[in-house]
Amino acid sequence: MTAANLVVKSVIEAVSVRDCFHLVLSGGSTPKTLYKLLAEEPFRSQIPWPVGHIFWADERLVPPDNIESNYKLAWDLFLEDVPLKEENLHRMKGEAGARQAVSEYSKLLRGLAEKDRDWPHFDVVLLGLGADGHTASLFPGPISKAEKSNGVIAAKAAYQNRPADRITLTPLVLNEARQITFLAAGSEKAEAVRGSLGKELDPKRWPAQRINPPAGKVTWIVDQAAAGSLGNSRN
Ligand code: 6PG
């Protein structure tokens, strides 16, 4: 509910200023409840869908009808039920190879950006958090040159039984968003929530610390179990 209200508030604000909204989705199981809610009343009617543009923070390299596809997840849970324009569904091409998917999404973002810019300012970005601390497909470990200089990159990392090959937006793009909302639930996320929000800055270990929009707002929506180890945090 909190997350759905936040999405509604941000998209209404965006539309009042720019006549459209840009919403970025993630995969994983945590946003499922939110996605379902968005297609239900009162949220469905509160969101001006026909002027909405939908993007993905990351995608697994599988076809769009594969059960592991982040596009399919969102499509099945709410996108097919709301009056979005088909041409405004900007999915990452998981069925293409990493290189092609990255190049096509970079091009797509450039095409939707303001003049002389490489990507739009997103209004709302929804991000999950892995138990290992990853967010989008930014995994713990050294921060690559590619991540520091490109808006969209390929990633490869084993996590649970999910497809390891992915593409992802980078902090360069995410940090220009107006509102970033992290969603985390369950005790298995407690350590990652604690590390990500902890006093100690270690963005290699905790990729969510790479998300720091200078002009945007970051909100964490965390259930009690995931908040379990908080107490010694920066926020
Ligand atoms: C993906 C995601 C990823 C996800 C986290 C949390 O495609 O896997 O976008 O970053 O948000 O892994 O996933 P859960 O919500 O399932 O824990």
Image: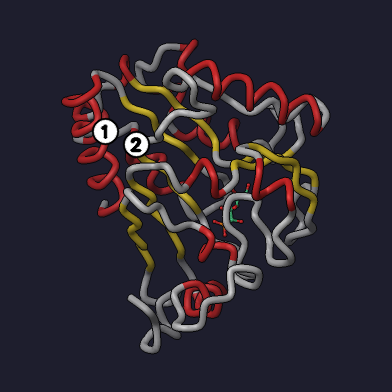
Count of numbered circles in the view: 2
Is 63 rendered above or below residue 6? above
Task: Residue at 45%, 27% (x, y): give it.
Answer: 54
**Residue kind at label 2, given as amino acid type:** Asp
Q: Position of residue 100 (x, y in %)?
A: 78, 24
Task: Indicate the quadrant where residue 58 lies.
Answer: top right
Q: Residue 11 got which mark?
A: 1
Left or right for 162, reference 227: right
Looking at marks 1 and 2 on the same chain, the residue that comes earlier in the sequence is marked by 1
Label 1 neighbour load within 10 Å: few <14, some 14-19, many 20+: many
Disc 1/disc 2 C-alpha distance (Å): 7 Å
Task: Indicate the quadrant where residue 197 lies.
Answer: bottom left
Task: Residue at 40%, 42% (x, y): give it.
Answer: 177
Left or right for 3, reference 154: left
Task: Residue at 46%, 16% (x, y): give it.
Answer: 88
Query: What kind of element bears circle 2?
Result: loop
Q: Position of residue 175 (x, y in %)?
A: 45, 48
- What residue did someone put label 2 on? 123
Q: Residue 166 got which mark?
A: none
Left or right for 155, reference 150: right
- Which of the image's four quarters has the C terminus? bottom left
* Tags 1 and 2 touching, CB below 8 Å: yes
**Residue kind at label 1, given as amino acid type:** Val
Q: Residue furthest front?
A: 116
